[in-house]
Image (tube, rainbow, N blue to C red):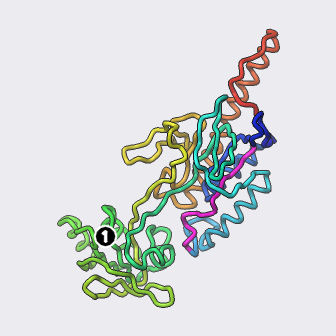
Amino acid sequence: MTGANNNTKDRLSYDVIVMGGGAGGLNAALVLARARRSVAVVDSGEPRNAPSAHMHSFLSRDGVAPLTVLEAGRAEIARYGAVRIEGRVDQVEAGENGGYVVRLEGGATLDARHVVLATGLRDELPEIPGVRAMWGEDVHFCPYCHGYEVKDRTIVVLGVHPASPGQALMLRQWSPHIVYVPHSRPLTGEERERMDARGIQVVEGPVSTLLSKEGRLYAVELADGRTVECAGVFLFPEMTPNDGAFDGLGCAKNEQGWLVTDRAGRTSRPGLWAVGNVVDSRAQAVTAAGMGAAAAFYLNHDLVDEEIERDLAAHRAALSGHAPEASVPAS
């Protein structure tokens, strides 16, 4: 195994540093550690799905608490020698002799040949009393993650995002009792027609608060005092990728400001990879895990190609009696 080592500046150096300890980051680390790569996972310990009591649609892990899955993943990567570092990455910079310098909050610095960004995204929630307190419990975003748990019961969808009407139309698959409250975003004529066609009730007026008893949602209250009893609330949050550590490295982004990657997870800059919600807002945990595994496969192949070129140059130099030029950091 190409273990971590100290370079000339007494900094720890790894083949790969994974930023983020969620399903995508841990699965990437697992594959790479089993490929005998030196791997460090920098993990803040604050996964996006932490507020949820259960994770769904993950084969063999359906209904399991998200943190239980992550604890199992941490133990698995440690079994193969990967290192988990509690903390956050402040910035990633290009190294002087190839590879990258990873600067952690607090001042620690690491070196890596490749870096995998798996830091997810931030959900920006509307400032409606009760939303944040019940987020992940009775207030949700993803129907595939939480729709089944409120099937056939009354679900309120809040109109807080351009995608909110589509969210309500989708949730009709799980329950015939969907109530759409436009809140801050009035419906267009076409959107209202679609609601009518799907049998979705529209209740006009801004929402003032979500009502709960003993921490569980039971109704939505409007500004005029009317209430809509319900078993769950769904809303579409504003989503912002946690990709600031790559700022300044020139990675290509799309028109919406999200990092562009190929199907393997490569960004436009060699040696930098991104997987999971940091590049795909709709990726569930199982999707992120698959993205992490796929990136790890291709990343290891890229490392092998680099090493072949290095060894070939050294081999040819030995035959000719000339020292090769250093092009790939030693593993």
Of residue 53 and residue 199, the one placed in the foreground of this image is 53
Q: Which portion, as a residue range, is magenta?
A: 38-52
Residue designated by label 1: 159
Q: Is residue 16 left or right of residue 193?
A: right
Q: Give the residue furthest to the top.
A: 320
Q: Is residue 111 left or right of residue 213?
A: right
Q: Quadrant of the C terminus?
A: top right
Residue 45 colored magenta?
yes
Q: Give the residue furthest to the left.
A: 189
Q: Quadrant of the N terminus?
A: top right
Q: Quadrant of residue 12?
A: top right
Vertical relation: 254 (above or below) 97: below
Q: Is residue 182 left or right of residue 29?
A: left
Vertical relation: 254 (above or below) 133: above
Q: Quadrant of residue 62?
A: bottom right
Query: In x, y percent, where is residue 182?
Result: 27, 72
Specify the amino acid type for callout 1.
Answer: Gly
Q: Quadrant of residue 161?
A: bottom left
Of residue 55 and residue 137, the one placed in the foreground of this image is 137
Disc 1 element: loop
- Report the residue at 38% width, 48% height from top: 256
Query: In x, y percent, where is residue 310?
Result: 73, 24
Query: In x, y percent, where is residue 70?
Result: 66, 64
Of residue 183 and residue 85, the one placed in the foreground of this image is 85
Q: Is residue 251 left or right of residue 21?
A: left
Residue 103 colored magenta?
no
